[in-house]
Image (cartoon, rainbow, N blue to C red):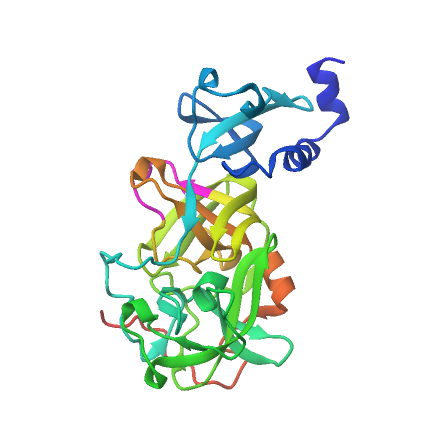
């Protein structure tokens, strides 16, 4: 059976699932996805099964057992170098921008937040906990929980501890539900009503109110604690393997690259974890940012997000807007920074 016949009898999704079954246990793999094939460092419009590796080596330097096939079930294979790590701040990192790291009297998506025992990430958005009907914030597991010892009821601070948050004065809520598996890296914390709320994402002035799955090529935008507002394009969809304090975990989601013309701009860095990726020009949430490329060169920039629809379904939450709850909502004016 030739390649064309095999492609008629199979789908690229089936080839992707075959790749997952056969190769996902290789510890040097950082991802397997469906995305645009690269030639000479430039994306083409041809779809491929892509293997992301920590270091891309010449075929001649690999043992036969380490080599990937040139195609799977009739679909081309591409190998991409991509070393990804969690997007929360690590000890010792000093952010270049500090305007989002201070204590905000009015809480807004896009500012520093974190578990009292962890570090600092981004307040992604406000949500309603469907089990209790209470308002909450959404961010990553590794921002609002961060360790195997985290427990429901842990204090959540704004700003996060890395940014000086401390004690009861800076406690804005408590950890409620968490998710860390193939469906996402996410957590919610119930608010304690000690501060006002403005649900508009900082510097985007958009209230997230709907959810959708991304499509390859979608233009997206996020507002994070460290890199502020950045724009990108969905380049692949699949499973990405990240090392957590609890071990290596494969998380389903999508990979984002800078949009055309912005290739030398960092779209994420430490502290952006938990940011919401919106479909550009809309109030629709596509994903929750959880990791990024470790290569410091902006030309190698990538960002990873887990699917919003899966996160919301598993955590039993829905978007919160100012019309949904009696909590005090601040005027939609951007704070003076």
Picture residue at 48% right of the left edge, 18% below the top: 59
Residue 3 is situated, as x and y percent measured from the top left of the image, at 69, 16
Q: Nearer the viewer, residue 206 or 178?
A: 178
Q: Residue furthest top?
A: 2
Q: Residue at x 42, y 40 (%)?
A: 83
Secondary structure, magenta segment, majority class: loop
Task: Tell me the quadrant of the picture where the C terminus can be found.
Answer: bottom left
Q: Residue shown at 51%/80% (left/top)? A: 153
Q: Nearer the viewer, residue 61 or 257?
A: 61
Q: Is residue 65 magenta?
A: no
What range is drawn magenta here? 256-267
Q: In the figure, 135 relative to 20: above or below?
A: below
260 within the magenta span: yes
Residue 263 visible in rendering: yes
Measuring 50% from the left and 63% from the top, which residue is drawn there? 141
Q: Quadrant of the N terminus?
A: top right
Residue 248: x and y in percent read 53, 49
Q: Is residue 140 visible?
A: no
User: Residue 169 location in percent, x, y?
Assistant: 33, 85
Looking at the picture, how far across and down is residue 63, in whole percent?
52, 20
């Amino acid at each position: 059976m030739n390649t064309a016949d095999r492609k008629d009898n199979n789908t690229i999704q089936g080839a992707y699932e075959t790749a997952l079954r056969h190769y996902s246990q290789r510890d040097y793999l950082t991802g397997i996805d469906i995305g645009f094939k690269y030639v000479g460092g430039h994306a083409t419009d041809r779809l491929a099964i892509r293997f992301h590796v920590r270091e891309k080596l010449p075929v001649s330097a690999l043992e036969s057992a380490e080599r990937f096939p040139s195609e799977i079930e009739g679909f081309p294979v591409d190998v991409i170098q991509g070393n990804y790590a969690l997007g929360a701040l690590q000890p010792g990192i000093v952010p270049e921008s500090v305007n989002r790291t201070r204590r905000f009297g009015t809480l807004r998506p896009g500012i520093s937040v974190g578990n009292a025992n962890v570090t600092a990430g981004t307040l992604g958005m406000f949500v309603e906990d469907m089990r209790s009907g209470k308002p909450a914030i959404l961010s990553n597991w590794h921002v609002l929980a961060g360790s195997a010892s985290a427990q429901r009821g842990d204090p959540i601070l704004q700003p996060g501890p890395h940014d000086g948050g401390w004690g009861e004065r800076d406690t804005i809520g408590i950890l409620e539900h968490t998710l860390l598996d193939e469906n996402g890296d996410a957590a919610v914390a119930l608010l304690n009503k000690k501060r006002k709320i403005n649900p508009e994402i900082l510097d985007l002035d958009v209230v997230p109110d709907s959810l959708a799955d991304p499509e390859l090529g979608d233009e997206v935008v996020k507002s994070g604690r460290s890199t502020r507002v950045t724009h990108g394009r969905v380049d692949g969809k699949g499973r990405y393997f990240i090392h957590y304090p609890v071990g290596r975990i494969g998380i389903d989601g999508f990979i984002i690259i800078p949009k055309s013309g912005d290739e030398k701009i960092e779209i994420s860095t430490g502290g952006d974890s938990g940011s919401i990726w919106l479909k550009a020009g809309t109030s629709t949430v596509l994903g929750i940012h959880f990791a990024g490329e470790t290569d410091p060169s902006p030309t190698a920039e990538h960002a990873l997000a887990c699917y919003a629809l899966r996160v919301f379904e598993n955590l039993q939450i829905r978007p919160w807007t100012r019309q949904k709850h009696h909590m005090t909502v601040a005027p939609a004016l951007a704070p003076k920074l």
